[in-house]
Amino acid sequence: MKRIFLFLTIACGVALSGCEKDLDQTPISNGSVPDFYKTAADFDQAMTSVYSQLRGFPDREVILSELRSDNMYAVSAIGSRDWDPINNFASTLSINPYVADAWASDFSAIFRANTLLDQLAANGAVTGSLRIRYEAEAKFIRAFMYFDLVRKFGKVPVIEHALLPQEVSKIPRQDVAQVYTLIISDLQFAITNLPVSYTGNNIGRVTAGAAKGILAQVYLTRSGPTYGINGPGLGLNEYGKASVLLDDLIAARGTARYALQPTYAAIFSPTNENNSEVIFDIQYINNGSLGSSFCNVVVPDGYYGLLGLTFSAGSVEIKPCSNDLVNTSYATTDLRKGVNIQSGYTYQNVTDTRPFYKKYVNVAAKGANRNDWSINYIVLRYADILMMKAECLVRGVGGSTADALTLINPLRVRAAQPALTTLTLESLMEERRREFAGENLRWNDLMRSGLALTVMNAWVPKDDVGNKITRPITANLLLYPVPQVELSSAPGLYEQNPGY
């Protein structure tokens, strides 16, 4: 059952021992690559190599999305770490390694997807429904990575084929609307051609439901305000398009097995993975290089010791949750708070009172070291479908606010909270904040809702006790800069985003 990365063990250890050099270091469009694509098994291994590019996505999202939002105030206690400038909205982010890694990793995944798509078109080794499914899977992942790029950087180069470096160096950044054209086309193809579910070792591959859910996010994001920047929001009022897709997912509960879990904690249990609430996740296994490391990004050594985990020292310090999230947004009776957040700890006479996310830390998922957890990372779950539908309803599309409350209140009841009787966009976003804390959705929620500037600037004086955020958060700071390494590799090709 465990999944896509079981295939990766074989792929990396056997076929990709020769192919990986082409995949990672030199353009896969060079002359040696077609020699690899000879059999259906070769294509399956190549498809796995595309999935493998998702492995580091959660780690980046913790830093570039959750930490960037009002959910965290991650200022280093000693010295200055690479994540501090992200927290502080610094003007020097073009040289930040996290920013550079996001650009490079997303385009690496796009490159692998493009290579597979090119070979599917040129090679007859895979035919029929399997060829169509591989094409749909590759297009989904390409769309997913481009959607991530648009939300982080705005304009980016649109590349639909595996190109040589000298060819890539001539492709400028395209307007966001052009990037969305490819994203939407790819996701529509995936919706039409992916199965609704899988069995056996194929569990974990992307489904038609995942494509519908991500496309609904795309339409909601495009509907958001422009903020006067060439960013992810285009003000297109496409809530109706999102609503139709979300209705399909809600109506398909019986056939697609989507349903809320009885308890909040059950969603994230390593003994309950691929449960009815999971629509799209990134799969991991304990295998040294195939385990996940995203939960380790915020968890200190001492807490592992408290749990009896004998990892060697080496994790970085706590990246705290914000006081506003912990003490203001959550009610003390909210069951989600205890699942999501550890409010300090004491271990070996050392006490740290700062709260941090513990959501995915479970000893049942531990591996050989702190970067080898078997727990999957949930990208999209059914609760998000319900809340996105409520967002459309609050916007006046597809029903009433009363209809929205019928979707939201089961989540509150599950968290032992009283049912809501009124709902606004602001209160809905705050409910999303509590439901998805630690799942790295908050920054994108603020952006598409139009609340990013007002919420963040109101939050700074409450939580920035170290006076690290030294300038107002303006529209130009809502996007990340183009990494300096990209500007330097092709001088004059890209213009820098304003504000940096």
Image: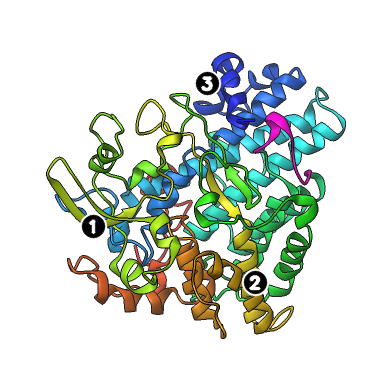
Q: Nearer the viewer, residue 377 or 218?
A: 377
Secondary element at image label 3: helix
Residue at the disc numbered 2 = 407
Mark 3 or mark 2, earlier in chain: 3
Residue 68, by quadrant, is bottom left
Q: Nearer the viewer, mark 3 or mark 1?
A: 1
Stretch in magenta: 194-204
Task: State how far apart marks 3 and 2 are (Cα).
Answer: 49 Å
Q: Nearer the viewer, mark 3 or mark 2?
A: 2
Magenta-colored stretch includes residue 197: yes
Question: Left or right: where does residue 476 sit relative to residue 39?
Answer: left
Of helix, strand and loop, which one carries label 2? helix
Marker disc for residue 21: 3
Residue 489 placed where, x, y %?
Answer: 42, 42
- Front residue of 125/424: it is 424
Dot 1 alpha-carbon crowd within 10 angstroms: few under 14, some 14 to 19, many 20 or more: some
